[in-house]
Amino acid sequence: MKTIHQLRIFLLLSLFLLIGNLSYGQQTNHPLDPLTWQEYWTVLEVLQETDHLNADTRFSHINLVQPNKTLVWQWNKTKEIPRVAFAIVHQKKKTFKAEVNLVNRKLETWNELKGIQPTWLEQEFGSMVDKVKQHPEFIAAMKKRGYKDLTFIDGVFLPPGYFGTEEQKGKRIAHSQWMDVRNARNTWSRGIEGLTVVVNLDTEEILRVVDEGVVPIPTVNIDFDTASIPTVREMPGPIFINQPQGAGFTMDGYTVAWQKWKFHVRPDHRVGMVLSTVTYKDGSDERQVLYEGHLSEIFVPYMDPSFGWYHRNFIDAGEYTAGGLTKPLLKGLDAPNYAHYMNGLAIHDNGRPKPIPNMIAIFERETGDPSWRHYSNAMEPESRVKRDLVVRCAAVLGNYDYIFDWIFQQDGSIKVLVGATGIAEAKASIQKDATSPSENGKPGDAYGRFVDPHVIAVNHDHYFSFRLDMDVDGETNSLQLDRLRTETLPEELPRRSVWVSQPMIAKTESEAKLKINLDKPTLWRVVSNTRKNHVGYPTSYQLMPGKTGNTLLSEDDYPRKRVGFINYHLWATPYQSNERFAAGDFPTLSLPGKGLPEWTSKNRSIENKDIVLWYTIGMHHMVRAEDWPVMPVLWHSFELRPFDFFNGNPALDIPKD
């Protein structure tokens, strides 16, 4: 009997696990739903059946081909919209793009991509480590540093950007980083400084070993898990948040409905998550706001000119998304326990799908802030509690973690936040600290800040490009620039000046390349060409920037030339379904001028068009002691605000109790 009982338990557990796995492969019920488990396998099977797949075939991307936008807006759950997937296929030194009809199981296109380097594969990061460890020059360099046994030396090979050298042209070049991993879990202070190996991954050649001199490895321990903290602070008591009547939003597959908002959200291998078909219900009218919004690119250039550091200018979403940009959220820590957690799929190098649990969290919260208030003696004092809906994912890119929030608010606004946390990348230094004498005429902290004895966190930037396909009351919009300027008043008036708005419509892409200028403030608004509010103004949404920064890289610096989107805070382009990534589709080892600079060089019309905004957040990071060994989350943001979209405050109807 006991054996039968155990067998029943085993079968029940097996069934439970099977059902759990199948949840990653559920049937689609929306044209923008992510690829299912079965659809990934359909791509692989079709490529195998057409002799385009073998044991050596590798993939950097398999994803949904964007369906026709107008058909998606018109979709009413009855008419089928074709589902097509694309794959970026590595066949040794060649790269191909395939498109597979998922319904008919048919290969529709197979084209070689020339003149590009595809995204780094997971296997490439470590593919040359063992071979380099046997190279006599590397062995000699390590002996100079006191290493005779390389068992505990780990290495990684990364794309070094592109600087137009003969060594780089047309080749899959990688530069190494090395670390001693003994007796440390957090090894970001254990780098072997001054030693770089340059390799060609296509030919597996070791091109050169660059030794800039011996720098001892710091002995500090920077582990920060609970066991490593000597004394954990006392907390005054728990705070409980619960929803006894359940969540205030509903889920229909990947479609979310919350109060008056409705939108689709899907996990995405390259950019983390994509929000689509965003509408706001105004009375009986479900009004369009945003067709699609998502992260487009991340760029992190470091500010150290040494050989081991000058090439560290990472185009993260385009170069480093092998295995997927985002990682699982930790329940109850990264987001509340009561959140709805959404699973997702990414791919292994061989194209096979792999599940990522808890990829996105969706939850309501009340921060204690009012939505609006006024204290009046003439009327009863009034205030309303503000409640938000948060959609969150978190990316992990080497040492850095980024938290991405899209916050839907009751007043019709959408706030987008990015929080930088994780570990600042640091280098070993011969000098001990800021009081040490200079070496070779320069202080040790010329390009960074001491954060521990013999440890310098290197100065760097973070840039984030967001793609915002605005559809304000329909697809036909324009970009209006409300320029606020000083108007001098007549001498007979006691006031000498006021400011006034001087509106203009940006007619072409060149007129929409804009930087924030606090001396000449300008409001950026996407205005409808088909609808006005009750006092005659075109309905619109404003893109309101938060704190940001300008690039300090010179115009002739290769990293800036390759990542041109950092030249402006705002860009606007006419909608093209294949223009999605601000630094281009293939930024790995890319040539200058790809992405937004190339597209906008045509100076296309953007007046009375379906337009896309591209917003750049910039952040200069001079690392402080408080950012070490793990950085408190530093938030940057922007907001999409209704501007004459409604006839009044849409949050007036929030109940008082």
Image (cartoon, rainbow, N blue to C red):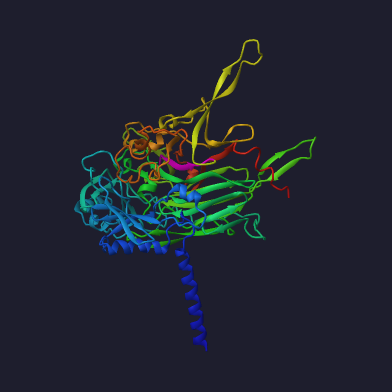
Q: Is residue 459 magenta?
A: yes
Viewer-closest of 507 and 254: 507
Seen in the image, is 213 located left or right of residue 614? left
SS majority, magenta: strand
User: Outermost residue toward the front?
Assistant: 79
Q: Give the range drawn in magenta.
A: 456-472
User: Outermost residue toward the bottom?
Assistant: 1
User: Outermost residue toward the top?
Assistant: 492
Viewer-closest of 173 and 85: 85
Seen in the image, is 386 located left or right of residue 118? right
Work out whether residue 615 can be spotted. no
Residue 143, how many percent across, how many down? 24, 53
Residue 72, how many percent across, how many down? 47, 50
Query: Residue 566 sits in which quadrant?
Result: top left
Query: Residue 573 sits in which quadrant?
Result: top left
Residue 82, how many percent across, how many down? 41, 56
Judge whether 528 appears above or below 327 on screen: above
Residue at 36% x, 61% y: name it.
Answer: 104
Residue at 33% x, 53% y: name it.
Answer: 179
Judge whether 573 appears above or below 149 on screen: above
Viewer-closest of 175 and 598: 598
Q: Is residue 449 magenta?
A: no
Viewer-closest of 521 and 157: 521
Work out whether residue 30 can be spotted. yes
Q: How many labels does the image show?
A: 0
Seen in the image, is 425 located left or right of residue 547? left
Judge whether 530 appears above or below 410 on screen: above
Residue 574, how many percent across, how many down? 42, 38
